[in-house]
Amino acid sequence: MELGGQRIAKGEMVLCSLTAANRDPSLGADMDRVDPLRDAPSHLAFGHGIHRCIGAPLAQMEMRIAYPALLRRFPSLRLAVPYDEVPFRELAIVYGVKELPVAF
Ligand code: HEM
């Protein structure tokens, strides 16, 4: 079969990177930038299909409540170090920061 212009032979394994898929330029411009107002309904942050994250509605509700509450409480919340110095985890199933120094 062929998928996205790539021929896949019978028995070959296909490993899908959700992180790379979420940066697909067909989803929109500048997909490396965090934009909470972005409309990207086909993102794969919570997976897809039968194993799609069962906690997605809870996680989305928590984010809708927690982020505005955090910014209301600390309106001048900002990075305490230059962005380039924020340490990211290199080997982890879920990508993210090792720590996030902030000032307020
Ligand atoms: C921002 C927060 C979260 C993210 C980004 C996230 C992401 C994901 C992803 C990508 C999958 C699919 C894994 C796969 O395809 O094998 C998944 C599955 C799952 N998630 Fe989440 N998740 C989050 C929060 C939660 C929460 C809050 C819960 C529970 C309260 C939860 C429970 C689960 C469970 C049980 C599965 C397995 C579903 C299955 O295999 O049928 N997740 N999650």
Image (tube, grey):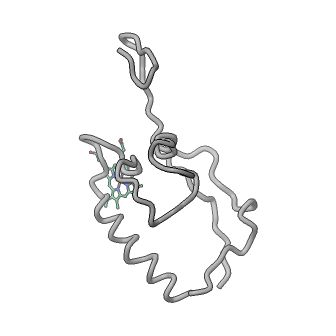
Q: Is residue 86 above or below residue 78?
A: above
Q: Is residue 12 left or right of residue 56?
A: right
Q: Is residue 17 left or right of residue 74?
A: left
Residue 45, percent from left and from top: 41, 50
Q: Residue at x 64, y 46 (%)?
A: 90
Residue 11, percent from left and from top: 37, 12
Closest to the observer: 3 or 102?
3
Closest to the observer: 52 or 93?
52
Work out which residue is located at the far left of the displayed protein and give it. 50
Q: Is residue 79 above or below residue 70?
A: above
**Considering the image in quadrants, where does the N terminus appear?**
top left
Residue 10, percent from left and from top: 36, 10
Q: Quadrant of residue 14?
A: top left
Q: Quadrant of residue 68?
A: bottom left
Residue 16, percent from left and from top: 44, 33
Closest to the observer: 86 or 44?
44
Q: Is residue 43 left or right of residue 82?
A: left
Work out which residue is located at the far top of the displayed protein and give it. 10
**Considering the image in quadrants, where does the C terminus appear?**
bottom right
Q: Residue at x 36, y 51 (%)?
A: 46
